[in-house]
Amino acid sequence: MTPSYEVMAVRYATRVTRAAEVYLNFHTYGDADHALVMDYFFWVIRNANRTIVVDTGFTPAVGEPRGRSMTCPVPEGLARLGIDPASVDTVVITHGHYDHTGNVGLFERASVVMSARELDFWTGPIARRFQFAHSAERQDIQALQRIEASGRLKRMAGTQLIAPGITAIEVGGHTPGQLIVVVDGEGGPVLLASDAVHYYDEVDLDRPFLVVADLPRMYEAFDTVSKIAGQPGTAFVAGHDPGVFDRFAALDPAEPGFGVRVG
């Protein structure tokens, strides 16, 4: 019997942006520009036997100079959930952007899963060109290289079973090896789209995100996400949309902005 998991999305930072700074070629849609909130999350998958963390956020030292407001730094968020980083057995890094790779050094015993294509890109020469480099932190990429050298980083391609009931799927688009994660949640299937879909409107309105490595693959990723999310009972979690707080139950009713229980 495949095990099921509790799945949680924890908000660690936020900012206010504009639609024209979120959607690719926004002016072509004929809509008026407007303010948008962008929330930043990491995700926890756990049951009685294991704890898996999907993405590791950024530190205040990285986020605050970029104009991001910390709401609950990742170490504090983990502590509030009763999670010792040393107890985490697997970390999934969905892609190499700075807001998904910080704090990876906290998880000293965990295996780290990442797309081979993604890691090769961010350790290669094109990633140093400005339009890519500004989205990553060199020290985070170097930390991932050290983890690989230690033997704890597992490269993947295509579709891979991370643990019983947890599957990572490489979709690309936003970055060369962007991953999504599908989980057998306690209440049914859960799709963690990460940055394959930042906002639900990306798939609902077919509007690509501004930051894109491969536009055709981004559209194909939308199709993949839509197909999975359309399966009966599937909980679909977008990567940065504050709408997740409207769709799912708060982890802490006294502080509803801390995070949600997805499945």
Image (cartoon, helix red, strand yellow):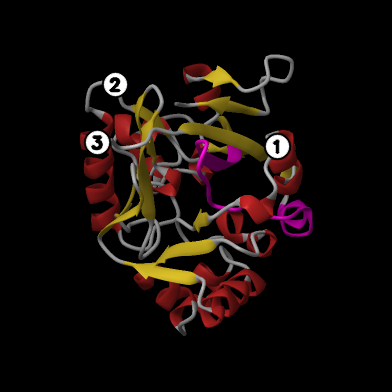
Q: CA distance from mark 3 to mark 2?
A: 10 Å
Instruction: Tell me where residue 204 appears, x and y as whole percent.
Output: 31, 29
Which residue is painted at 49% across and 43% down in the image? 22
Does dot 3 land on a helix, a strand or a loop? helix
Tell me the tag on residue 228: 3
Q: Amino acid at mark 1?
A: Gly
Q: State the residue position of label 1.
A: 82
Q: State the residue position of label 2.
A: 233
Query: Quadrant location of residue 198?
Result: top left
Does dot 1 land on a helix, a strand or a loop? loop
Which residue is painted at 44% across and 48% down in the image? 195
| Residue with the most extreme top position | 253
The magenta span reads 39-66
Q: Is residue 63 magenta?
A: yes
Tell me the tag on residue 120: none
Q: Amino acid at mark 3?
A: Ile
Which residue is painted at 69% across and 59% down in the image? 106
Instruction: Tell me where residue 169 appears, x and y as whole percent.
Output: 30, 53
Q: Are marks 3 and 2 in contact (CB under 8 Å)?
A: no
Q: Quadrant of the C terminus?
A: top left
Residue 228, placed above or below residue 92: above
Q: Is residue 57 visible?
A: no
Q: Is residue 43 magenta?
A: yes
